[in-house]
Image: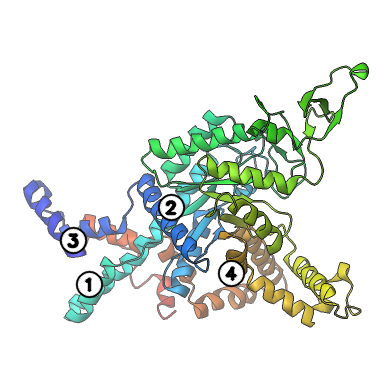
Amino acid sequence: MTYQQRIGELNSTISGAGAPWAAIDGESAARMQVQNRFPTGLDIARYTAKIMREDMDAYDADPAQYTQSLGAWHGFIAQQEIISVKKHFGETRRRYVYLSGWMVAALRSDFGPLPDQSMHEKTSVPALIEEIYTFLKQADARELGGMFRALDAARGSGDEVEARRLQQAIDNHETHVVPIIADIDAGFGNAEATYLLAKKMIEAGACALQIENQVSDEKQCGHQDGKVTVPHEDFLQKIRAIRYAFLELGVPDGIIVARTDSLGAGLTKQIAFSTEPGDLGDKYNSFLDCEEVDPSNVTNGQVFISRDGKLMAPKRLPSNLYQFRAGTGEDRCVLDCITALQNGADLLWIETEKPHIRQIGGMVDRIREVIPNAKLVYNNSPSFNWTLSFRQQVYDAWAEEGRDLSAFDRDRLMSVDYDATDLAQEADERIRTFQRDAAREAGIFHHLITLPTYHTAALSTDNLAKRYFGDEGMLGYVKQVQREEIRQGIACVKHQNMAGSDIGDDHKEYFAGEAALKAGGSANTMNQFAAA
């Protein structure tokens, strides 16, 4: 429906209500409708799920069409990310927001900063999804409000051409609402708990939920030690629970991202249930580190499984966990991924210990032998030392080529002493093209950075505090922040506008007419930035 059609429909509704609605203006109501395109979180989930499905199809046709996101821990951060995307690229296509459970634990828990071990409140994740979409919808309202004021000005000056252009721009306005890939950790309990939390997250607007195959009550950050995985059937129950949640809420296109931590997880809490050789439980158990048992030398409390007609004792730790054989992580990852896709997952996430395209691509090639269109969401993690890793990758490649490396110490390649070298420059170029190359060579559909805004907030605050509390004083803020905001066209330099003061003024005028006491008058100091 076009802007003019909305006005006509609402004017008809208002006139039909008679005298009690005589003070209601159809165009003002139409503007409020346009500014709130998504009344509910489910409207958002359905809209964004369709976007992701289309993007997945586009990637299958051309791996250059990969997608990206940045992790956000507050609605304002997500809002500024997407405002920036629209400003610099003119559209939001293939750009999403990522919601990191790590950042929720560290920054959004009532308990205070917590490690990434699923100790934060379950409700804090759907609450953040809702908050992010509140801020993204407010960005729509703010941008459209500017268009409406420009339209009024064009009409007031009699510029019909500009007025028509603005009406068309309003009709074709691109929303700031983009897909969120949201972290549900290991489901915060059993399959029923996973289902209940998934519903809350979907109702808040999430179209894509990422779940990992760790034990809920033993959950660890994917880049820390001590990870414990569950048998496949336990994980598949949670995948099915999420799919039921999507279907119940009328979001059949909802996306499930199945994450495997098996590459770095050497422990399991359970021996899988198996009824016959070669079934899924037997495959899981085949990775257990076992010793053949001498029936005459059985010790107290031992647990046994049969393997190839032999009685075997899995190695059991004092923690009551069982360990996998060393070197089986990649095989377990591949089996995890194939199994997840065969049982309802849409995308994969393999948590690795370094950003190495050949390592990732090798696993994806094996998965695609069974599932040809398998594709990944990949964590371009701040837990990786990207500089050192890629300099070492270049060093190793040059060593294979027989190049002279006598000027380099492989263990010290992070040093600033190497920054100007050809090796460092080639490493930086590989980092620059990593996403493009990995999308093409390693099946990565979506690249995300989990915690970028955690780090940027810390870095920028450190720089500001050092200058402001030091010799620069107020110049430390003006020179490094405000002046750069003005010159780079950062919208929140007009922070009252960004916080919604102009939207509030518009509403006051709708509700009170000439009696409205508006904030945006001549005495508003924000007018100093009119030329910004």
Q: Is residue 337 above or below residue 234?
A: below
Tell me the residue that label 4 is attached to.
Answer: 436
Q: Amino acid at mark 1?
A: Asp
What distance separates the C-alpha of mark 2 from that of mark 4?
29 Å
Q: Residue at x 47, y 53 (%)?
A: 132
Residue closer to the observer: 86 or 370: 370
| Circle 4 residues within 10 Å: few <14, some 14–19, many ≥20 | many
Q: Residue at x 64, y 53 (%)?
A: 366
- Is any atom of residue 115 visible in this view? no
Q: Is residue 92 left or right of residue 319?
A: left
What distance separates the C-alpha of mark 2 from that of mark 3?
25 Å
Does dot 4 land on a helix, a strand or a loop?
Answer: helix
Q: Residue furthest front?
A: 309
Tell me the residue that label 1 is attached to.
Answer: 152
Tell me the residue that label 2 is attached to.
Answer: 133
The quadrant of the rendering that contains the N terminus is bottom left
The label number, if any, that marks residue 27 in the structure image: 3
Q: Amino acid at mark 3?
A: Glu
The answer to the question of whether label 2 and label 4 lie on touching residues, with beta carbons closer than 8 A, is no
Q: Earlier in the sequence, mark 1 or mark 3?
A: 3
Q: Earlier in the sequence, mark 1 or mark 2?
A: 2
Does dot 3 land on a helix, a strand or a loop?
Answer: helix
